[in-house]
Image: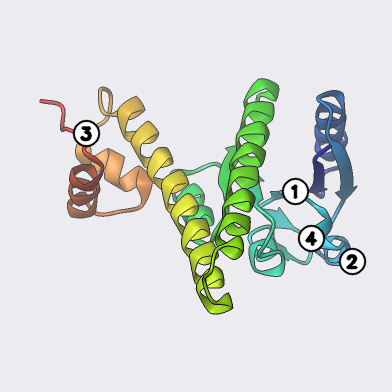
Amino acid sequence: MNKILIVEDEDIIRSALKKLLIKNGFDVVDVGSLDQAKQCRFRDFDLIISDQRLPGGQGTDLIALAPHTPVLIMTSYASMRSAVDAMKLGAVDYISKPFDHKEMIETVTRILASSASLLAKPIEVQRSSLAPHESVAATEATATSATNKSLDDYFIQFVQEHEATLSETLIAEKLGISRKSLWERRQKLGIPRKK
């Protein structure tokens, strides 16, 4: 059973999320602040779901505090800019509040499945004849690749969902990047421009 830490200062949201996750078969611990979260052993958890704005700091602070545990950021201050910023800091994904129950469970399941496959890869590398420092480098490269893939997937989905209704300028603005960066990223990811 996967163990999840919820860090959310709003009691109603924390309680509702805990019930939802337990109902779907997850083992859940919940706390109401960053200071309370710091008392937890992060390695005991398979996923941390945290509000972005917390008493005592930001939810993204947990990324550095728990480098071996994926962090899903949720916020009611939804904007593309904050989503991109959270992902740049290393959040595995981002979800807006109020969240859709189905979307939350799908996101949690996807993150846990992805994390499980990442954990399997370092074991294979460590069993090979590589030196210890090479195993660490391979593990870090795999984790970095997964984070970049998640950000690329987010970018592709956002562009494809909005290109019919928004101009290139507005898409770039909502993503918090320049039009040139948008164009370069589209080319890199093979997303053709709509005429």
* Residue for point 88% across, 47% down: 30
The location of residue 161, given as percent across then percent down, is 35, 26
Please report contact status of discs 4 and 1: CB closer than 8 Å, yes or no.
Answer: no
Q: Is residue 183 visible?
A: yes
- Residue 99 visible from this viewpoint: no
Tell me residue 40's x, y (percent).
87, 62
Q: Residues within 10 Å of mark 4 (few under 14, many from 20)?
A: few
Numbered disc 4: secondary structure: helix
* Image quadrant assignment for residue 136: bottom right
Dot 2 alpha-carbon crowd within 10 angstroms: few under 14, some 14 to 19, many 20 or more: few
Label annotation for residue 46: 1
Tag 3's secondary structure?
Answer: loop
Q: Callout 1: few (<14), some (14-19), or many (20+) C-alpha neighbours within 10 Å?
A: many
Of marks 3 and 2, the one in the foreground: 2
- Label 2 – label 4 distance at C-alpha: 12 Å
Query: Looking at the image, which residue is at 63% across and 46% down?
Result: 115
Is label 2 or label 4 in front?
A: 4
Give the amino acid at mark 1.
Asp
Judging depth in this view, the residue of 92 and 123 nearest the camera is 123
Q: Position of residue 188 (x, y in %)?
A: 22, 47
Which circle marks residue 167 in the picture? 3
> Which of the marked residues, 3 or 2, is nearer the chain's N terminus?
2
Residue identifier under label 4: 43
Q: Disc 3 vs disc 1: Cβ atoms closer than 8 Å? A: no
Give whichever of discs 3 and 1 has the lower sequence position: 1
According to the picture, the residue beneath numbered tag 2 turns out to be: 39
Question: Is label 4 or label 3 in front?
Answer: 4
Tell me which amino acid carries mark 3.
Answer: Ser
Identity of the amino acid at label 4?
Answer: Arg
Q: Nearer the viewer, mark 1 or mark 2?
A: 1
Q: Amino acid at mark 2?
A: Gln
* Furthest residue in direction left, as rendered: 195
